[in-house]
Image: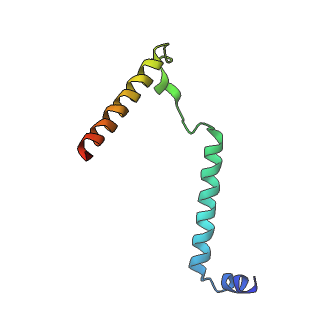
Amino acid sequence: MGQYLNQRDNRSELQQRLDAELRAKAAAKSKVEADRPDGVEDSAYIEGTKQTTTLDWVWVLVGFMALGVFIYFIYLVNS
């Protein structure tokens, strides 16, 4: 613990100034991000989209079938 405190005392003025500037930037950035909880300034990008329909299970099935074909292909190549 004493070595850590001693190490902080040996910092140059430039290092101290850079540290203060970086801390100020980080504080300002966190304050800005706290104002927008979802991280998006404008949610207009979501206009014109629709919710998932009742056919979402079909896409899951297609994904599993594609995965099965891929695994089968790997099996054939290694045989």
62 left or right of 34 in image: left
Q: Which one is in front, 25 or 50?
A: 50
Whole-percent x, y for residue 4 in the image? 70, 82
14 left or right of 2 in image: left
Report whether residue 47 is seen. Answer: yes
Residue drawn where x is 29% and y is 42% of the image = 74
Report whether residue 49 is seen. Answer: no
Quadrant for the C terminus in the image: top left
Quadrant for the N terminus in the image: bottom right
Residue drawn where x is 59% and y is 36% of the image = 38
Q: Residue lying farthest right?
A: 2
Residue drawn where x is 66% and y is 84% of the image = 7
What's the colour scheme? rainbow
49 left or right of 30 in image: left
Q: Is residue 60 above or below residue 38?
A: above
Q: Residue lying farthest front?
A: 79
Whole-percent x, y for residue 17 in the image? 60, 73
Whole-percent x, y for residue 33 in the image? 61, 45
Q: Which one is in front, 5 or 27?
A: 5
Whole-percent x, y for residue 64 in the image? 41, 29
| Occupied quadrant, residue 6 | bottom right
Q: Which one is in front, 66 or 25?
A: 66
- Give the total number of marks visible in the rendering: 0
Q: Is residue 79 above or below residue 4?
A: above
70 left or right of 33 in image: left
